[in-house]
Amino acid sequence: MNAPDLSNHEPFRWQQRGSSRVPFWVYTDAQLYQQELSKIFYGAHWCYVGLEVEIPNTGDYKLSHVGERQVLMVRDRVAPKDRLLDNGIRVVENRCAHRGVRFCQTQHGNARSFVCPYHQWTYKLNGDLAGLPFKDGVKDGDAVNGGMPEGFDVKDHGLTKLRVEVLHGLVFATFSESVKPLADYLGPSIMPWINRIFKAPDGAARKLTLLGYNRQRIPGNWKLMMENIKDPYHPGLLHTWFVTFGLWRADQKSRMVMDEHGRHAVMISRRNEADPGSAAAGVRQDVTEGVTSFKANMALHDDRLLDVVPEAWWKIDDPSNSGADITPTVTMITLFPSLIIQQQVNSLSTRHIVPRGQGEFDFIWTHFGFADDTPEMTQRRLRQANLFGPAGFVSADDGEVIEFSQSGFASKPFHRALVELGGREVGDTDHMVTETLIRGMYRYWREVMETDT
Ligand code: FES
Ligand SMILES: [Fe+2]
């Protein structure tokens, strides 16, 4: 083999047409990553920051991130007369207006106001500057020393406030003034799948319960996590757990759905009906033959991990075939750029992607259930959550292959990934033997990154 010719390498030019061949430098280039932060995370996109149920009481707050910028999701005071119109959820940047200190260090808490430790500037829950020491100077006899200059107005020096929208208890924020309202941003093909989980039959938000968190740091580019959840090719191959115990296999009834831009997606799938309690249940030879992760002799010591109980809300009127029902057992929703919403049988979670440079991201899992769950259902959701998170029976595999991918790219940035299963075009499908959702994301990514703003 000849050595590659690097003389024509143009690091910021995606050479091929379309989005089926992804240059490795999109995962490894530090300068490009800075552009992604400004065009994607701080640009005209909505980013997930948390669940409303995480801050139930006035003064409750949670530290979160939009891109790399740390923010606080806060429950502000709201006068009773305003409560119908104002849910009180604010998102402010955790950076003091005086000299930039990250004033809040606590992951979750309750506060009457926020006080920066450095010079004790004090902010209201909504981010307004309430006051600061020595604003009017310090008396020295008849004289006054120092103080802020004439014309200094506390109104001009609040925290950076983000635009906020809450959708059925999911809280999103953006630094952008121009991004469309959240429902339009998500689009009509994605919304029914969010509604299915979060909207009660009477139209209100379903009341959620918080079951717990997992956090992990994954040494890979943030887009690899989005790709992983837009990739129905791998679960029945990589994941021993899925293929052996029948939770995800290539012959399942599936559908891949995107928004009009290709940036958001839903992988929808229905588990085969065969009894899933043992290995080899419902096996079709052609989808397990030669699959090295399939372990015919593998058995569980505690089969309660597979104690799947169908729930009424799983069934909805089919959004793409009105009048017919659809009852998926799995929906994996990717909301570009930072959120994955997972329903894998009875296990529910949000997964928040927080980038940290081009080669690393934090991944925060919030496991939840519904306030009207029985104690048995809560236990079931918690048991099934063992499949996910950093050490999950399934998800540990994903963290590892993302790490392997990144190290593969780093040593050969001029090469490219091949994303051509199911063709080179972008479009919804009614099967899972395709990489169309990844092509959709990169088609959109190119539009954003190759446009001068
Ligand atoms: S930096 Fe926050 S009060 Fe000075
Ligand atoms: Fe996976």
Image (cartoon, grey):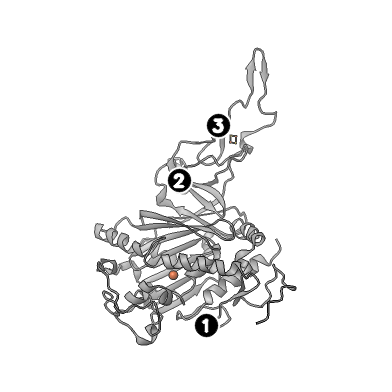
Measuring from the top left, give residue 56's x and y in whole percent: 39, 46
Read off the residue under disc 1.
422
Residue for point 68% across, 81% down: 2
Q: Residues within 10 Å of mark 3 (few under 14, many from 20)?
A: some
SS for callout 1: loop
SS for callout 2: loop
Verify CB contact (< 8 Å) between mark 2 and mark 3.
no
Horizontal side of residue 19 vs 364, given as left or right = right
Name the residue type under label 2.
Gln
Residue 203 in view, yes or no: yes
Disc 1 under 8 Å from ligand 2? The reply is no
Q: CA distance from mark 2 to mark 3?
A: 20 Å
Q: Quadrant of residue 324?
A: bottom left
Name the residue type under label 1.
Gly
Quarter of the image containing the N terminus?
bottom right
Residue for point 37% across, 54% down: 212
Read off the residue under disc 3.
120
Disc 3 under 8 Å from ligand 1? The reply is yes
